[in-house]
Every structure is written in C-alpha cells, then in structure tokens.
Image: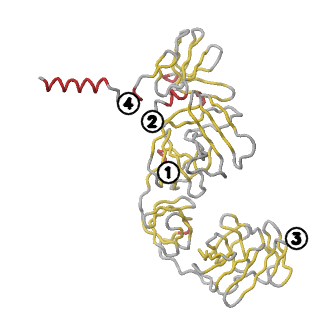
C-alpha cells in the first residue's frame, strides 16, 4: 500500500508541475494572450467583416460592439493599416476599430529563440520590409570592429533600435519601434553547410515574401547555410557575390557527390586549402551557369565553372618571350589614356601615372603607376612574381580570356588576382578589368 501511495504522489507531482515556462498561461489587459498574437481589437459598434475564400467568394461575420478579437497579423502600406483576425477575416483600421498592441516582450516570451521580422511597408521608415532584425558589432563584444557599423536591438514593450554608422561621425539613430511593426518567428539553429538550389530562386533581403530581391539565382547554384532557419527560410551567403540573404527552405537541398573532375588552371578558393592547382582532383557536386561547387579533401569550395575539366588538362603554357607590351602598341586606355612617349615607356597627363618595362635574361620587369612587378623567367603556373618587394606567384595561365578590350591568349593571373596579357601588359584585376581599349 505504501508503494502505491508513493507512486500516486509522483504522478500528481508531475501533473501539477509545469514542464515549461512557455506552457504557462499569459494574461495581458484582462485577457489571455496566445502564441502568434500581435494585438487585440474591439469595435465601437456592431459591424460586418469579410474574408475572401479560396474560390473567390466572400464570407461575412457580424461582430458585436465591445467584444474583443485577437489580431494575428498586421499589414501597413499606402498609409493604410489592416488587421487580420482568426479564420482569415481582415479589417481596415478606421474610427470604428480600437486596437491595442501586445507588448513585444510578452509576445517574445512564447518563443525559445524569437526572431524579429520588420513588416511595415509605409514610406519613410528606418528599416526595410521583411528585414530580419539582428544586432551586430556591439561595442565590448568579442567580434567588435570599430570600422564597421553598430546595430543593436533590444526587446521591451516596444523594440529599441540603435544604429551608428562607421566611421562614427554625427549622432546615432535611436528610435523605438512599435510592437505592431514586428512579426515574431522561431529562429531555429541549423547545421552550417553548402546546399544547392533545386529550382531557380531569388535571394531576398529578409525571410519573407515581399522582401527586397538581392539577386536571381539559377538551379544548381550553391549557397552557404549560416546556421539559422526562420519563417520557412534559410539564412545564407552567396559564395560568388558574398551577399547575405534568405532563400526558402523548400528551394534548397543537400549536395550530393557526383563524379571526379580536374582543376584546369590554378584558382583561389580560400578556407583550409587556399589555392587549388592545375591537375588537382576534386569531387564535383553541383553547378549553375557560371559557378561550380566542389569538394577537395573533405572541404567544400566554389570555383568558376570553366576552371573544371572532365579529363586531365594539358600542361601549363610556358612563356619565355613576348610578355611585355609590343613595340607596335601606341596607346592603352584604362581610366586614363597612356600614350607611348619613348622606347619601353607610356605616359599620361599626370606625373604619377606611367608605364615602363624592360627584360633581362632572368626576368620581365613591368612598372605601372609606381608599382613594380618582376616576373621570373620562364613564366609558368607557380613561378615566382615579386610585387613591391613581396614574394608572390603565378596562380594561373588562362588559354584565352575575353575582356571589354578584346580576347587575349595565355593571360597570366598572379596570386594577387592581377591579370597580364602577353604583348599588352596589365589588364586589371580579376574583379575589375580596367583595360578599356588599345591601339
């Protein structure tokens, strides 16, 4: 009997003890608040409200004066406000409607990790529709950088927003944002990895349809998951443009190993391995129109699609002569016009902008605007390049490269991403092709 009595006490204790603070009933303004509720409203007289059904028809409901109704979503645009009740009924704010917003801290208490999304479309607001509101670069934090903007959000009855733009001149922006301008969704931790698109999709500025479109992405494009899933979206980073944004969860899928490929020419990938070299064998995972996702020794990287070969590529070209600008070349147009003024020299209207060059048995010497480059002979992938007394190397030699100035052969790319065309000179960087024309 004693045994059964002890068991009964244990059962009663488990029933009476709350399992989570999230399960406790929350009351505010004389009524119970539920998860997802943004506010409550009453009407100053009996009115009829409507909702549009999926078949295009409308249903109506008569609501009584002074009866309160929960509001779950709010729309603000074109100087209008609409409140969404349960079951799809939408009411425009008028003098017949009395609305009260639930304090933000009460709404957030229903979530383990509340994610804040800005939902006000009205003009002249400090934030964009659909923005995921995240504090960053807070002074005193481990990752604080005085050269970056400071953004801070604090949850209270309203949302406190603090913004201070680097380089910290003038006054910061400090405002309180209404709770009704915020939608809350659970921000769920997710594994960090590369996923690929299973269909064309848009990279959005926030985790909500209607957020600003940052870029269009093609099926097969790879994105780095940053570890947060919110409102049906993954927070991601594009490895090609470095933009941070959001893509629907359903549009992304884990990568799958397909077949082996070879690196066609040297390419920088960063991360653990830094540089991949011609002939390196990699695992092909996915590709879009310009970029491929690969795996090399257990690490995932993105590379230009054209940097991959299905069979072992040819040996690197070797340049032993004809690397410096041709004697027949008279003009080079970058942002400024460079004109030949003598043997192995081009000048501009400015003393600090010029090109000189010469060759010895050991190296090619090329100087542009005060920066000297020394290419050790013979030039091939991996050979030494000295730039301002700093040791670098030839990353790649491209068989052909098309630029705004034309198509060039055996273009040399250094480990600093500067490109040189034999017979012409510097083209610019791989990210900014500066040579416009020549004659």
State how far apart marks 1 and 2 are (Cα).
21 Å
Side (left or right) of 251 relative to 171:
left
Q: Do the residues labelled 4 and 2 touch (CB within 8 Å)?
A: no
Q: In which quarter of the image is the C terminus?
A: bottom right
**Mark 1 Cα-neighbour bin, 10 Å: few <14, some 14–19, many ≥20:** many
Label 2 residue SS: loop
Badge 3 or badge 2: first in the primary sequence? 2
Residue 370 against residue 30 in the figure, above or below: below
Badge 4 or badge 1: first in the primary sequence? 4
Badge 1 or badge 3: first in the primary sequence? 1
Give the residue pinned by disc 1: 225
Return the mark for residue 20.
4
The residue lying at 74 percent from left, 74 percent from top is 371
The colour scheme is secondary structure
Give the residue pinned by disc 2: 112
Q: Are marks 3 and 4 in contact (CB under 8 Å)?
A: no
Residue 151 against residue 367 in the figure, above or below: above
The residue lying at 48 percent from left, 54 percent from top is 196
Badge 1 or badge 2: first in the primary sequence? 2
Side (left or right) of 257 relative to 305:
left
State how far apart marks 4 and 2 are (Cα).
11 Å
Side (left or right) of 16 relative to 386:
left
Label 3 residue SS: loop
Residue 155 lies, in percent from the top left, at 56, 33
Label 1 residue SS: strand
Disc 4 versus disc 1: nearer the observer: 4
Seen from the viewer's position, the closer of residues 356 and 246 is 356
The residue lying at 62 percent from left, 48 percent from top is 214
State how far apart marks 1 and 3 are (Cα).
50 Å
Residue 291 lies, in percent from the top left, at 55, 61
């Amino acid at each position: 009997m004693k045994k059964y009595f002890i068991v009964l006490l244990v059962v009663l204790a488990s029933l009476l003890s709350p399992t989570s603070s999230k399960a406790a009933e929350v009351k505010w303004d004389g009524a119970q608040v539920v998860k997802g509720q943004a506010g409550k409203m009453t009407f100053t007289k009996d009115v009829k409200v409507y909702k549009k059904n999926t078949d295009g028809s409308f249903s109506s409901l008569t609501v009584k004066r002074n009866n309160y109704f929960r509001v779950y979503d709010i729309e603000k645009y074109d100087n209008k406000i609409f409140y969404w009740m349960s079951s799809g009924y939408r009411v425009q704010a008028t003098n017949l409607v009395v609305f009260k917003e639930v304090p933000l801290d009460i709404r957030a208490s229903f979530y383990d990790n509340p994610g804040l999304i800005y939902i006000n479309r009205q003009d002249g607001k400090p934030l964009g529709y659909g923005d995921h509101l995240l504090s960053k670069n807070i002074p005193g934090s481990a990752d604080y950088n005085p050269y970056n903007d400071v953004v801070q959000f604090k949850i209270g009855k309203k949302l406190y927003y603090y913004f201070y733009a680097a380089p910290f001149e003038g006054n910061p922006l400090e405002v309180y944002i209404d709770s009704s301008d915020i939608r809350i969704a659970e921000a769920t931790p997710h594994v960090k990895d590369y996923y690929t698109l299973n269909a064309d999709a848009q990279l959005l500025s926030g985790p909500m349809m209607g957020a600003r479109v940052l870029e269009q992405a093609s099926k097969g494009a790879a994105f780095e998951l940053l570890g947060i899933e919110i409102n049906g979206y993954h927070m991601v980073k594009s490895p090609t443009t470095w933009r941070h944004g959001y893509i629907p969860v359903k549009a992304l899928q884990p990568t799958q190993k397909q077949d082996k490929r070879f690196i066609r020419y040297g390419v920088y990938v960063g991360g653990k391995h830094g540089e991949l070299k011609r002939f390196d064998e990699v695992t092909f995972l996915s590709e879009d129109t310009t970029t491929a996702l690969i795996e090399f020794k257990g690490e995932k990287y993105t590379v230009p699609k054209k940097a991959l070969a299905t069979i072992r590529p040819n040996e690197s070209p070797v340049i032993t002569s004809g690397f410096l600008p041709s004697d027949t070349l008279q003009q080079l147009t970058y942002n400024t016009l460079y004109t030949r003024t003598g043997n192995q020299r081009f000048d501009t209207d400015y003393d600090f902008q010029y090109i000189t060059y010469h060759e010895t048995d050991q190296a090619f010497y090329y100087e542009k605007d005060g920066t000297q480059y020394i290419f050790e002979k013979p030039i091939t992938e991996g050979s030494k390049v000295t730039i301002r007394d700093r040791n670098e190397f030839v990353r790649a030699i491209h068989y052909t490269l098309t630029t705004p100035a034309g198509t060039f052969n055996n273009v040399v790319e250094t480990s600093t991403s500067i490109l040189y065309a034999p017979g012409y000179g510097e083209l610019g960087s791989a990210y900014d092709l500066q040579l416009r024309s020549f004659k």
